[in-house]
Image (cartoon, rainbow, N blue to C red):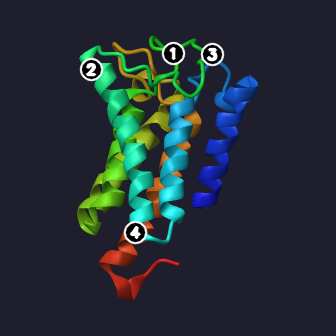
Amino acid sequence: MLWAILAVAVFVMLSWKGGFETGIRIIPDAAPMQFNTALCFGLLAIAGLRRLETDMKWWAVAGLGLAAATLLQDYSRLYFGIDEFFQHAWYAELSPSPGRMSPFTAVGFIICAAVRLSGKPLIGMLLLGLVAARASAALIGYGLEVTSLYQIADHRTAMAVHTAALFLIFTSFEICRLWGVWHPDRRVA
């Protein structure tokens, strides 16, 4: 599961580097997955694949920091230059700040990384459930063409379709992992 998330993240980052528009947005006229979004998914996937606890934490902290800085930029009106630090956003349509992930996405990464770092299985499963619900709402919004489900009304940056799908996959994996921590006698294979 984590390898698949990492593969999609790398594919999206390579699509940004290579100018492959279909790789960054899989539905025409839909929001693209931003480069930093793919990078955060890659960091969280690597954190999950690491066997050493200290290694895992560094990868998760990097993802959390990038998402938190993005969210801080959004609501403080400050500009840190991280939106296009790794890749120029050559596709800036549907985004008031080229290269910036949506606030929904940033909050999702903050929650996922914090749960990975916390070691609190029950609270973690509940918080991951919120991220999964938000991602599900975005996918339903795309399916029913209800933009308010994947986009903040006064903010044009929307959650991309494959961002929502990857959040569902990641949160499902993490909830299963945490269930095994919470109930070691009932591990999910």
Pointer 4 with pointer 1, Cβ within 8 A: no
Q: Amino acid at mark 3?
A: Tyr
Q: CA distance from mark 3 to mark 2?
A: 23 Å
The relative height of residue 79 versus residue 57 in the rendered view (above or below) is: above
Q: Quadrant of residue 10?
A: top right
Between marks 4 and 3, how big is the CA–CA gap?
A: 37 Å
Is the Cβ of the residue at disc 1 closer than 8 Å to that at disc 3? no
Q: Secondary structure at mark 3?
A: loop
Q: Which residue is mark 3?
A: 91
* Residue 79, image x, y percentages: 36, 16
Dot 2: element: helix
Q: Residues within 10 Å of mark 1 (few under 14, many from 20)?
A: some
Number of residues whose C-alpha sits closer than 10 Å to that of mark 2, classed few (under 14), some (14–19) or many (20 or more) = few
The dot on residue 53 is: 4
- 50 or 33, which is in the foreground? 50
Q: Which residue is mark 2?
A: 75
The type of residue carrying mark 1 is Pro
Three-letter amino acid code at the position of disc 4:
Glu
Total marks in image: 4
- Depth check: 21 or 72 in front? 72
Q: Tell me if I can see residue 129 in this picture.
A: no
Q: Upstream in the sequence, badge 4 or badge 2?
A: 4
